[in-house]
Image: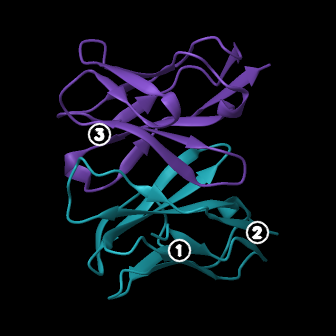
Amino acid sequence: AQSVAQPEDQVNVAEGNPLTVKCTYSVSGNPYLFWYVQYPNRGLQFLLKYITGDNLVKGSYGFEAEFNKSQTSFHLKKPSALVSDSALYFCAVRDYDAGNMLTFGGGTRLMVKP
Amino acid sequence: KAGVTQTPRYLIKTRGQQVTLSCSPISGHRSVSWYQQTPGQGLQFLFEYFSETQRNKGNFPGRFSGRQFSNSRSEMNVSTLELGDSALYLCASSSGTVRMNTEAFFGQGTRLTVV
């Protein structure tokens, strides 16, 4: 069975500084990894995905993620944080044997302070 | 292109009642999945439908059921509601057959409160 861990419940960063939201995963086969963001009272919004290829994946709103197979990690990054980036971020993994089912991490609340 | 539409946005029900939630996927998408989001348990997979067939099911009691219609719209039903069923229920649609490289698009959710 697959699993995802987001070790930090909350990440605080000052506006303009780089941010990192951590994610580690466990799957039996090849990992298919996703990042989603959730704003208050809203659904999940897709940010980026890793399927195969380059370990650095670029996504929406200036976010990128680095896939590291040896460390089984898929950390979300942004060079310069904005106050509007403050939200709840979820890492997810898809298992081929489970159809389109996504397994999510517990979420990390990102707080960007002016 | 319209996104995933979930109705209603908010519901208040009494313990013991049943409830039906609706989801209209993105046009052309044939896979619809449902998730339950609670502060304690996070996001948990309920079930997935593809071409009117349930393809996968999460670890939820039989009180939770769903179906998908020929136009890919989906409904989920919860019978004999319990207080613990209070949650945000999210629907997600994906394009085509099982292709691991397709991302899921989520609706805004239905907030169910059981009193």
- Label 3 element class: loop
- According to the picture, the residue beneath numbered tag 2 turns out to be B114
Measured Cα–Cα span from mark 1 to mark 3: 24 Å
The amino acid at mark 3 is Ala
Mark 3: few/some/many CA within 10 Å (<14, 14-19, 20+):
few
Measured Cα–Cα span from mark 2 to mark 1: 15 Å
- According to the picture, the residue beneath numbered tag 1 turns out to be B63
Q: Chain in purple?
A: A
Q: Position of residue A101 (x, y in %)?
A: 34, 53
Colouring scheme applied when the structure was drawn: by chain
In this view, B4 is above or below A109: below
Chain for disc number 3: A
Chain for disc number 2: B
In this view, B99 is above or below A6: below
Residue A1 marker: 3
The amino acid at mark 2 is Val
Q: Position of residue B55 (x, y in %)?
A: 27, 67
